[in-house]
Amino acid sequence: MRALTVEEARQRATDLAVRSYRVEFDLTGPGDTFVTTSRIQFATGTGTSWVDVKPERLLAVELNGTALDVGLLAEGRFPLTDLQDENELVVTAELKYSADGEGLQRSVDAADGKVYTYGMSSLESAPRYFPCFDQPDLKAPYTITVTCPEDWVVLGNGAATQVGPGEWRLAETKPLSTYFVTILAGPYHLIRSEHDGIPLGLACRQTLKEHLDREAEDLFRTTGEAFDEYHRMFRQRYPFGEYWQAFVPDFNLGAMENPGCVTFADHLVFRGPVTEAERSTRARIVDHEMAHMWFGDLVTMQWWNDMWLNESFAEYMAHRVAEDATSHGGNWTDFAFVRKWWGLRTDQSSSTHPVAPDSLKNARESLDDFDGISYAKGAAVLKQLAKYLGDDVFLKGVNAHLEAHEYGNADLAEFIAKLTEAGAQDLANWSDQWLRTSGLDTISIERTADGVVLHRKSPDGSRRPHKLSVGGYDANGAATIVDVMLDQDSVEVALSNEYAVIVPDANDDTWAKIRLDATSLANLPAVLPKIADGTTRAVIWNSIRDSTADAELDPRQALDLFVTAIKDEDSDIAVGSLVRWLEEHVLGVYLPYDESRGPVADALAAKLATVEPGSSLQLATVRGFVATTDDAELLKSWLDGVETPAGLELDQDLRWELVLRLVQLDAFGAAEIDAELARDTSTEGVNHAARCRAALPAGKEAAWTRIMTDPAIGVKELLAVADGFWHPGQAAITAPYVQRYFTDIAGTDAIRAGMVIGLTARRIAPRFAIDESLVEPAEQLIADESVVSSVRRQTANFLDDLRRALAVRRTFG
């Protein structure tokens, strides 16, 4: 299928004005297809255009009452000729349900066999389930009807009304872009509420009913708190009527901001105990998607190069609102430890790009830029902008932008113009420095004879101004914080040079690589555990992680710091993030697995003996310990209910983590996996079992074949199989598959579409094979333009990590 280019989109937006859509879905067929009819009213001043549709079979096309030849369809486009000033186009198509999470997804619940569907439009997926003019700047109102089995319910962007047995009508919407049009149809469990005059709803599979019922109070409270704060900040109230939050199966993202009916991955309906970090993460996802009701849905970017006007804003606002207005804390600490670390790595990769690029990428390639830059870096830059301008000017400009472009589209220049009208100065230069460049500055401290000097080193000709704080910490961790405007390459700081540890950007207000001086590094083991602020500790750890990746700091020194500091770490966010970093980048990557794993497990075991029973910190510590210990007999005893740590609830998801580790240790086999699946026959159990089977030495070939050749496997099961495949303790077993990645992964775009292609490539790349011989095949795959861009992007990310690991090993042995 051809991908829409920016030139084509601009021309079609000039040529057409879409008046309305009336879309009819018939979901009553017995097979793996359904029928959709789109009735589109549009005006044009040109004689030709095209409509997007990607069917199994095009049934009929009628333009202004004249039937057209369905055989004219080519590469997902149906040509339109002899257009009039005002036109009515009616397209009927038989389309295929998807299994890759985009289009009209159809999933069967493993526990009860019930069928659930939902629409995911994404960047190119809308024509997979309804004919349309598929680009973000051709907005129109929608009226949708659905015919479905009589025991199903229907939700969508407009309020749904049942008009007969199995017949539903959705109220006409405000003007929407095609990429956030959705319907849901299936035997969903529904919960209704209301806040400040806004009808609220939650939906999930029937087998998650008891869990959603338990979680509803938290979800509705968070939703209400967020609405109140957004209404306080924005002069416009929520504009899209009802507000449903639907938790759907086989979702390939965290959530999608469909106006009036946000879809979430249903693992966010917690089946058992979770950490406070996971609850606050869910709250931020709720807040993020709600922010999109204004940033993205009310005002939409004109083309995908300005996606940051959606994602960066939503990311920044989510952390801000969650911290200021909801009952869930630790949000900026999580941003620093998790989101910012993701973005820092992305911005130092070969695939880095500006936050707001002058991009001419087509719609398919633009999908690759939904990454740590468009989310985390953009959010950090907006946080810096709000600090730089002050909240009054920032919000005044934001509100003017929303009001000027409501129900329409806008670009970066229009946003900058409104901030300038609000009182911001020199934003064109600020935009050029922060939004139009890629890469990041390095900020370091020098202790001089007279005091402290802050240095800025730029990777290019840009000279980004940084408004930040510098913290000095004495031997007891007590802090002295001073604010600094770093607008030159070196600036003196009003801080004594005698502090044990000095931390640039201690409050995590800017976007830069942070480097600590030698004295601070030497004092960290004693001082770091005493620093009270979790965000500052995250800034320090990001510096340690980044210095290690750059082969500037011995990974053994970083590992020793973890072992020393983790016993006093009181943040479950920090424990979880640091253990993931060790698993993904240190154990078996920078350092030999057998050498490095033991100290981590021992440190977590020692911490486990001291944490409060039943606490969130205990659960985070247990998960890290399970993932790193080699004590198979202890893990077996926990599964049997013997010697389980006091206060620990061994729920089904944690049981599966134990089973997985025992499989990796070759202490469990297929029989034990089957036995655990018999205990947990849910869809979640099927996915966990698939991950465990992929970890079996005898299960590798079957797992590889499913990943590379099976188009019917659901998204969550597919990613679970990929997650379970590689492990540094199985290097000899997985060695035959390392080279096969470079020959096999390129063909997966023939059986899947959209985001899941890149997600799969990222997970199944041989990340623990640290071998110079892999550089050449990786480079060849990246250079092969016949390979879909998402596979080449993820292979480039793999190669970046490989080169870093090779450099670390060469430097430190």
Image (cartoon, rainbow, N blue to C red):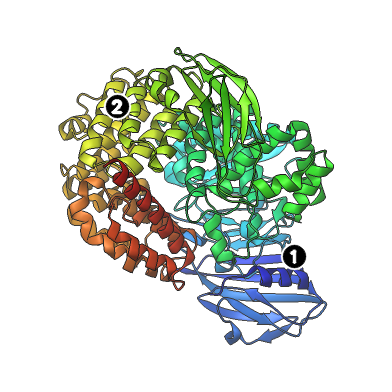
Residue 597 screen position, x and y as percent = 25, 36
Q: Which residue is mark 2?
A: 604
Is residue 559 visible from the viewing direction of this image?
A: yes
- Answer above or below: position of 355 versus 129: above
Displayed quadrant of residue 440: top right
The three-letter code of the residue at mark 2 reads Leu
Dot 2, how many residues are within 10 Å of its Cα: few (below 14), some (14-19), or many (20+)?
Answer: many
Q: Which residue is mark 1?
A: 20
In front: 349, or 500? 500
Find the residue positioned furthest to the front. Answer: 449
Q: Secondary structure at mark 1?
A: strand
The three-letter code of the residue at mark 1 reads Ser
Q: Secondary structure at mark 2?
A: helix
Which residue is found at the position 71% from the left and 76% from the top? 89
Residue 275 screen position, x and y as percent = 42, 30
Residue 622 screen position, x and y as percent = 31, 29
- 363 sits left or right of 772 in the view: right
Residue 545 screen position, x and y as percent = 41, 37
